[in-house]
Image (cartoon, grey):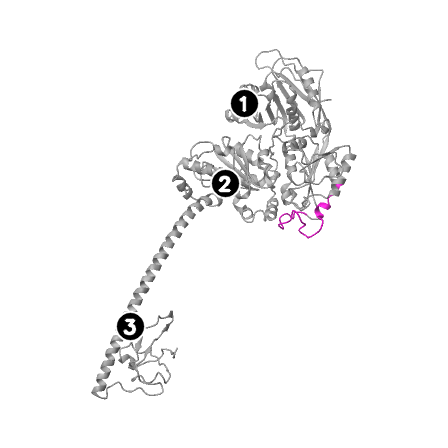
């Protein structure tokens, strides 16, 4: 660069020469080599407030003889002679040509710039249209979610972009897409029987999704039953990360099928579920229940809207870094006087609370390993935890020390109780146990042993949930996990007093004390004596019961029900009893009809509008202990396989209460009862009741025709 200057001069000579108004003149102080009076080409760049002006065209230095150096006065532009005038005219002509060339090039440059700006505008306009389309699609999807998730009312749009996309595919194409995804994930079973519903039909299809261990899978049964009762014609499917999910819900009549998938496969499946009209409702359970509605959903909008209104304020805990905010979440739940089950029922808009039963329909277990328990009263213990969240030794911070467990076993044996240890094979063996069943039973076997235990001792974990499902009371020692959130009111929940409730304050809370201690003070603070004293206090004394024939005036099923006031249950123990029950409907107020799981759905389809129908599994009646005033069991005979059902009925009734057994007329009940009692007690484990057959019957067998029945009653012996 030869020189620079600021255009702040008023140059009259420049104005007279025809260049602007002369107010923005400038002087360049060039070197002497350039200031030689000859013509030169200069390239001038002008810097404007908005940026640099592009380089101007080359200009001849035609003013060199009239533009004097700054130190000299400007000479008069008037010609001194004719030759000089001619020269100036020639120079002026050159200036005009140079000016024309400059203007032409400036115009071309301006037009090129206009073309560039127009092209850029077209690009911006196209990008804006794309963003507008994306925003429109996002808005449609958001409106649907707002309708579900937010508190503000809005107008429901019948079709969002997913439904519009779904409409572009035929039902066959949607079905093929569904089957392709199932095949790619290796899924088998009932899901292959589903077909796009196209928004028509009555029966809903519901997918319930959860994660975690056995306990986390088991507590979903409360949600399953609530939704199954609310939507009796629905097909319910379960997806869970735990491999035991199918075994847990194998006999559950509310569940059509259950599958186990890892996180990646579950994500792929749910993406397809949310894009096709296969399901009507997706239920994501993370303590808080969240509903989403796939395209063409037939789920009742008011139900979903109400639930989502309730769940909206809890989304900040479960939608961000789940489950790392669980500590703050559980603290807020318990501060409002709720437990884990209360918040599930509240946010799901379903009948679930801390008193809800958990369903596991256990079957008779004839495993030889449990023969040592025949005729004995025993207590079960469990020392272990989920392998995925344990330390290298298979122990979690919420487990009691081995030394404490050894003291517990010693004290229980001193009290003449058999100690049975349940759990997985990798868990520590407790010193002093009588029967070691770790890793030797399936879930059904473990549930069967738990069901007949007098009490279960454990730390917070999966077998506590199973014991709750079996209606066996537990003594639970709590530490890192909060008792008010996880504890069942039916149990004795012992909280650590030194330190507690530190779960999810650190990512490794389950394997290392968050305070950095080598030992977990919360669990070492528990007293073995206190735990055993609490367990022995909970054990119920052996109840001696006699089987007698009731008053002959009770000659019909309806009379039996009417004479029994309060909360009651009518248990059908045989298929033939269904027709007998149908003739005597309706049931009394506050009475439920319990039907075998094998025929539950058929009977419910016929009688759902006439009475409250619930399933039972013979060994399992889904009713809390001591919650009924009476139970009437309707059976064909006093076969020995009826006695587990009788024992379950005795568990459900209050003390004092009555269990009636209604048999067909002319049943040789005394002979059957003696034989069945002997057979049942010979193979019984965990004796809770001692049955006898009374020699003195109350009344005579009724000989009238019609709906007469032999009605027997269990009563405490005097």
Q: Sequence order check: which comes first, mark 2 or mark 1? A: 2
Callout 2 touching callout 1 (CB < 8 Å): no
- Please determine whether, in this image, residue 417 is positioned above or below residue 660: below
Residues at circles 2 and 3 in contact by the CB criterion of under 8 Å: no
Region in magenta: 500-528
Residue furthest toward the left?
82
Give the quadrant of residue 692: top right
Q: Pointer 1: residues within 10 angstroms few (<14), some, or many (20+)? A: few
Q: Which mark is residue 102?
A: 3
Of marks 2 and 3, which one's residue comes earlier in the chain? 3
Residue 273 horizontal/vertical position (percent): 48, 39
Q: Is residue 54 above or below residue 430?
A: below
At mark 2, the secondary structure is: helix
For label 1, the residue is 586
Q: Secondary structure at mark 3?
A: helix
The residue to which callout 2 is attached is 269
Q: Is residue 505 depicted above or below 51 in this figure?
A: above
Specify which label sits upstream in the sequence, 3 or 1.
3
Q: Which residue is painted at 36% across and 57% down in the image?
A: 123
Q: CA distance from mark 3 to mark 1?
A: 105 Å
Mark 3, mark 1: which one is toward the viewer? 3
594 relative position to 454: left or right: left
Does the rendering let one see residue 303? no
Q: CA distance from mark 2 to mark 1?
A: 45 Å
Of 500 and 261, nearer the camera is 261
Q: Quadrant of the C terminus?
A: top right
| Magenta stretch holds residue 521 | yes
Judging from the image, what secondary structure is the residue with disc 1 in? loop
């Amino acid at each position: 660069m030869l020189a620079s200057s600021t255009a702040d001069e008023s140059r009259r000579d420049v104005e007279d020469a025809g260049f602007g108004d002369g107010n923005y003149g400038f002087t360049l102080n060039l070197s002497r080599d350039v200031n030689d009076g000859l013509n030169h080409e200069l390239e001038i760049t002008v810097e404007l407030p908005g940026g640099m002006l592009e380089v101007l065209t080359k200009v001849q230095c035609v003013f060199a003889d009239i533009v004097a150096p700054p130190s000299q006065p400007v000479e008069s532009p008037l010609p001194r002679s004719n030759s000089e005038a001619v020269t100036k005219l020639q120079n002026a002509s050159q200036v005009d040509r140079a000016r024309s060339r400059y203007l032409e090039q400036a115009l071309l440059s301006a037009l090129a710039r206009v073309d560039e700006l127009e092209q850029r505008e077209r690009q911006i306009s196209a990008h804006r249209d794309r963003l507008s389309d994306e925003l429109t699609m996002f808005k449609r999807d958001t409106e649907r979610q707002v309708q579900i998730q937010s508190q503000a009312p809005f107008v429901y749009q019948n079709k969002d972009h997913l439904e519009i996309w779904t409409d572009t595919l035929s039902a066959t194409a949607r079905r093929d897409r569904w089957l392709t995804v199932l095949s790619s994930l290796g899924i088998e079973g009932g899901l292959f029987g589903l077909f796009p519903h196209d928004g028509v039909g009555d029966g809903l299809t519901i997918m319930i999704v959860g994660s975690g261990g056995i306990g986390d899978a088991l507590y979903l049964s409360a949600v399953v039953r609530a939704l199954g009762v609310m939507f009796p014609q629905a097909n319910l499917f379960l997806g869970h990360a735990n491999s035991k999910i199918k075994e847990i819900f194998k006999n559950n009549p509310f569940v059509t099928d259950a599958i186990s998938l890892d996180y990646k496969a579950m994500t792929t499946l749910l993406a397809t579920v949310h894009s096709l009209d296969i399901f009507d409702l997706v239920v994501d359970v993370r303590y808080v229940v969240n509903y989403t509605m796939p395209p063409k959903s037939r789920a009742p909008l008011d139900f979903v809207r109400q639930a989502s209104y309730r769940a909206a304020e809890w989304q900040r805990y479960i939608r961000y870094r789940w489950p790392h905010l669980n500590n703050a979440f559980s603290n807020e739940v318990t501060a409002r006087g709720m437990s884990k089950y209360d918040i599930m029922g509240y946010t799901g808009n379903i009948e679930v609370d801390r008193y809800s039963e958990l369903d596991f329909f256990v079957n008779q277990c004839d495993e030889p390993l449990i023969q040592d328990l025949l005729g004995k009263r025993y207590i079960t213990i469990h020392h272990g935890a989920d392998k995925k969240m344990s330390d290298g030794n298979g122990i979690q911070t919420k487990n009691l020390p081995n030394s404490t467990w050894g003291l517990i076993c010693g004290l229980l044996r001193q009290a003449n109780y058999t100690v049975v240890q349940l759990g997985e094979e990798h868990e520590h063996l407790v010193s002093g146990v009588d029967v070691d069943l770790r890793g030797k039973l399936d879930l059904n076997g473990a549930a069967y042993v738990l069901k007949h235990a007098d009490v279960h001792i454990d730390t917070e974990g999966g077998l506590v949930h199973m014991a709750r499902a079996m209606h066996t009371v537990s003594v639970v020692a709590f530490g890192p996990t909060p008792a008010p959130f996880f504890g069942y009111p039916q149990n004795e929940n012992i909280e650590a007093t030194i330190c507690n409730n530190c779960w999810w304050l650190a990512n490794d809370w389950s394997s290392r004390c968050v305070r950095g201690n080598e030992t977990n003070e919360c669990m070492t603070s528990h007293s073995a004596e206190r735990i055993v004293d609490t367990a022995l206090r909970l054990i119920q004394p052996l109840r001696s019961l006699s089987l007698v024939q009731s008053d002959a005036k009770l000659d019909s099923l309806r009379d039996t029900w009417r004479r029994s006031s309060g909360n009651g249950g009518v248990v059908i123990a045989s298929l033939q009893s269904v027709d007998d029950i149908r003739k005597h409907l309706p049931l009394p107020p506050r009475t439920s009809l319990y039907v075998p799981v094998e025929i539950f759905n058929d009977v419910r389809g016929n009688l759902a509008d006439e009475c409250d129908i619930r399933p039972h599994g013979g060994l399992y009646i889904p009713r809390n202990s001591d919650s009924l005033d009476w139970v009437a069991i309707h059976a064909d005979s006093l076969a020995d396989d009826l006695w587990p059902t009788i024992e379950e009925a005795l568990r459900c009734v209050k003390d004092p209460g009555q269990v009636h057994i209604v048999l067909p007329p002319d049943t040789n009940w005394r002979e059957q009862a003696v034989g069945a009692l002997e057979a049942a007690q010979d193979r019984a484990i965990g004796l809770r009741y001692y049955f006898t057959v009374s020699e003195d019957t109350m009344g005579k067998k009724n000989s009238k025709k019609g709906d007469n029945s032999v009605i027997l009653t269990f009563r405490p012996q005097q």
